[in-house]
Amino acid sequence: MPSLLIIKMRRYVIAGNWKMNQTPTETRSFIKTLAPLVKGKDNCDIVLCVPFVDIWVAAEEAAGSNIHIGGQNVHFEEKGAFTGEISANMLRDVNAEYVIIGHSERRQYFGETDETVNKRLKTALAHGLKVILCVGEMLDARQAGITEEIVSMQVKLDLAGVSADELKNVIIAYEPVWAIGTGLTATPEQADETCGTIRAVIAKLYGKAAADEIIIQYGGSMNDKNAADLLAKENIDGGLIGGASLKPDAFTAIVSAAQ
Ligand code: 13P
């Protein structure tokens, strides 16, 4: 029997989330190293979401390459007395194209809720940023068998009020919290199943065409060893990569696995 060949209509998006790592100086030399390694690997979109102070340098170094740059959060107000926050205009002005919103570390350590995630997401879209929206369950939720309910609720609340047209600029990253930075990866089957759940929620909210189009990434200890198996799954259209995105060779191997 010939093995089943899954032909993906969606384009892979491989994104690094550097979290609070790398100075502007380190960023410059990292991108000088990475750009030639990923040159010509055009079957996926490559994104690096870097700390705010690195964005300008990263965008400057990545100009003319196939690497796209993003931030890791954005505030929902246009401007004003919000010490420590960054506006969408500011991100655009330093040439960020993407922004991560709702990462579990923001939710866990900085008190972000589905309500603030939704507000940030709508502001980012209104300013022409492409959003990587993160959702995912904690370990106790997975053990209690309520992953589907938790993730579905997050998707619905986080996308409330987002039009079908705006959704075209949203990528959803499924990141089980128990798999982040722990070395515990969801199995390809677990990851595919929950990405499939997310796609079904999108179908309910926006229709089948939108569900077929939306890019859904997996994130959580994705690395050069496990990427190919995860990316081969029908519902997994890319990765949001933490630790391995800080190593040019490992990140390039993940990009190659998405070709
Ligand atoms: P790790 O790849 O380090 O587990 O991080 C995943 C993540 O949180 C990406 O946003």
Image (cartoon, rainbow, N blue to C red):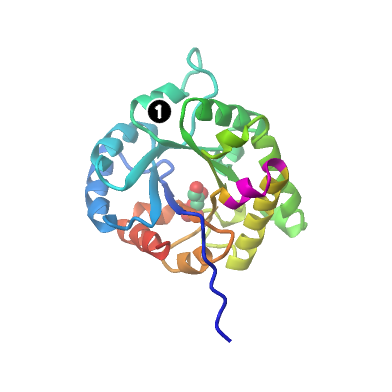
Q: Picture quarter containing residue 143? A: bottom right
**Residue that lies at the very extreme toward the bottom in this rendered image:** 1
Majority secondary structure in the magenta region = helix
Query: Horizontal and vertical percent for residue 8?
Result: 51, 61
Residue 210 included in the magenta stretch of the image? yes
Name which quarter of the figure residue 119 lies in: top right
Q: Residue at x 39, y 27 (%)?
A: 92
Q: Give the residue at the far front of this rendering.
A: 209
In this view, 56 is above or below 4: above
Residue that badge 1 annotates: 91
Residue under the point 69% across and 54% down: 197
Q: Give percent across and percent down for residue 133.
A: 56, 41
Residue range of the region highlighted in magenta in the rendering: 205-212
Residue 138 seen in the figure: no
So how many labels did they put on this image?
Answer: 1
Instruction: Name the amino acid type tagged 1.
Output: Leu
Disc 1, SS: helix
